[in-house]
Image: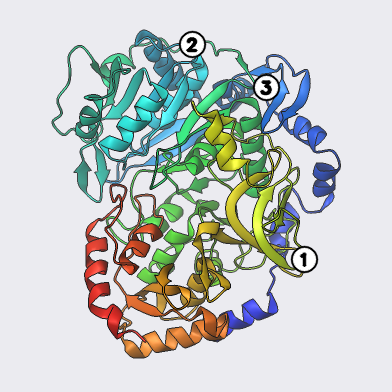
Amino acid sequence: MGAEAIEGLLDEGRTFPPPQDFKRQALITGAEVYDEGNTDYEGFWAREAAELDWFREWDTILDWQPPHAKWFVGGTLNVAHNCLDRHVQAGHGEQVAYHWEGEPGDTRTITYQQLLQDVQRAANALKELGVGRGDRVAIYLPMVPELPTIMLACARIGAIHSVVFAGFSSAALRDRINDSECKVLVTADGAWRRGSVFPLKENADEALTETPSIAKVLVVRRTENEVSMDAERDVWWHDLVPDQTADCPPEHMDAEDLLYLLYTSGTTGKPKGIMHATGGYLTQVAFTHRYVFDLKPDTDVYWCAADIGWVTGHSYIVYGPLANRATSVLYEGTPNFPAEDRFWQIVEKYRVTQLYTAPTAIRAFMKWGDEHPAKHDLSSLRLLGTVGEPINPEAWMWYREHIGGERCPVVDTWWQTETGAIMISPLPGATTTKPGSATFPLPGISATIVDDRGQEVGVPGGGYLVLDRPWPSMLRGIWGDEQRFRDTYWSRFGEGIYFAGDGAKRDQDGYFWLLGRVDDVMNVSGHRISTTEVESALVSHPSVAEAAVVGRSDAQTGQAIAAFVTPRGDVEGDEALAKELRDHVAKMISPIAKPASLLFTHDLPKTRSGKIMRRLLKDIAEDKELGDTTTLADASVVDAIKGRYLDHSKSQP
């Protein structure tokens, strides 16, 4: 789709109603569920909670003492029981829970019965290592089946897990272990990354020199590289877990008992240990997974292509899918190893029906070329999802056309580590979608947009996205820091109003459009311009694969727009294209939004989860010393960009 078509799409607000074939089979096809969720939201969530198995029903649906909410007070349940035991007891033990695909091509097929047995053995192993109810367990593993197994084992015995993304440094691991005083670390000898071994155990050992709370380390053998083992502290998984009995009754957990901690990967300052509880969290992730992805557990093969080290993986690889008895794909590797069609090989091989991935990945697929998905049979797909950041309309349309064959609804989802579950998203059988819009808050969720004074803005209008009512999967606090919890999320507009940190706007039809973090809003000559809007305009040009935009200090205008652009395929990034792109932005948004500087680069600085680190680009644009680069997937990218920027910035108009 070319630039003119995209401009028309944006101008006309092009819409896509649910495909008729999809709608005929969809779980939800009408608006009644919204009325139900908004008329009596407490009753609505109580009915969803009743879909789970409870050992004891709750006495009170919601106790709301802003900013603290307690859901299903007095109720007891166990997350592992709800994800495994009840399905096996209902006769579904032979259903596949996970099709696991390793990066080198090794595979495992794990049924619900097998996973239940594995979890009980792992739970007993944790007990043998001294882990009990309320203890914290750090998990530093690649995307192998032992990762969801040990998470569920923690949930089974009432331990609180803290998963640390396997791409993080030893310093990041150390800080997270120390903040929550974890008792046991579960890690692996190494992790496969593009055919090479990432030294996971070596990193862990370095971290453990400064983690006095760790008593034992459980080590999974994955890559079989040589590692050092402390005889008193370290235990091999294969020596301890398989010999345990597959009988470990689930603990009866209070609905408000903590299920896990997950540290936000903030690039500056101390990471925040986000606390998620048991009953409300499982209720909302199960509801959203079932209805946003229109799950049919007897026939679907669902694939969330995230990493379990992030909240997306917690909620939509482990807890939501297993609570709903889904058959999922679990993939260890990257999208382009050993070739740029690896994702599409997997979709074809397992006959995937739902694919949930990030706009960053989609733009990478676009850059690599349409021919890669075209080589594979993707006809099994019936729904596509996006997560992680606002998706630009060009990528949305490419995804729908080249991956979904123009027959699959696209559900663009907005949520955060802190919200625990999806908050704004289409319901694919009921919602007419617009490319680039997350559409509307889900049933039972209340979101709105306010101005600087906290007053709700009209429709159309833009400002700050807030949540003005509690929701079941909401964060219960920041571990060990109540004041930071209040200051970070509840101080801007009042302690009963959660400020998400994101800017948003609603169009004339009331559709929500996410504009990114409010600190990504530039002030150019008194005009507030979103980096997301400029990036979307750039990427809508047919020559552009990816773009990142930052505001740099400017003596004349306050801030000036600096753009970093990766061209598509064999397109040459020259001055003629730079001028064309500036004019394109001016036409799409306004002449005020034209980048003052535009640099072509073969790649952008990204974390190992695929998020663009705009903070580093801002440092480059303002010729400052670079901040922390430890979370970068490839630090050399920054050095290359900095050299090119310094060489070319003076020649930009």
Compare residues 58 and 374 and report the one nearer the observer: 58
Count neighbours of disc 1 (C-alpha within 10 A) and say few if under 14, some if 14 to 19, many if 20 or more. Answer: some
Above or below — where is 485 with respect to 4?
above
Q: Secondary structure at mark 1?
A: loop
Image position, residue 197 (x, y; %): 20, 42
Residue at position x 70%, y 18% in the image: 75
Residue, far front: 555
> Residue 400 has which mark?
none
What's the residue type where badge 3 is placed?
Answer: Asp
Cα–Cα gap, marks 3 and 1: 42 Å
The earlier-in-sequence mark between 3 and 1 is: 3
Image position, residue 428 (x, y; %): 68, 55
Image position, residue 495 (x, y; %): 68, 38
What's the residue type where badge 2 is placed?
Answer: Cys
Decide: marks 2, 3 in contact (CB < 8 A)?
no
**In terms of image quadrants, where is residue 568?**
bottom left
Above or below — where is 591 with respect to 24?
below
Residue, far bottom: 576
> Residue 248 has which mark?
2
Question: From this viewpoint, is residue 283 visible?
Answer: yes
Mark 1 lies on residue: 459
**Is residue 282 left or right of 349 when viewed as pictured?**
right
Between marks 3 and 1 in the image, the one whose residue lies nearer the viewer: 1
Query: Total label count?
Result: 3
The earlier-in-sequence mark between 1 and 2 is: 2
Image position, residue 604 (x, y; %): 33, 64
> Residue 53 has which mark?
3
**In terms of image quadrants, where is residue 452?**
bottom right
Q: Secondary structure at mark 3?
A: loop
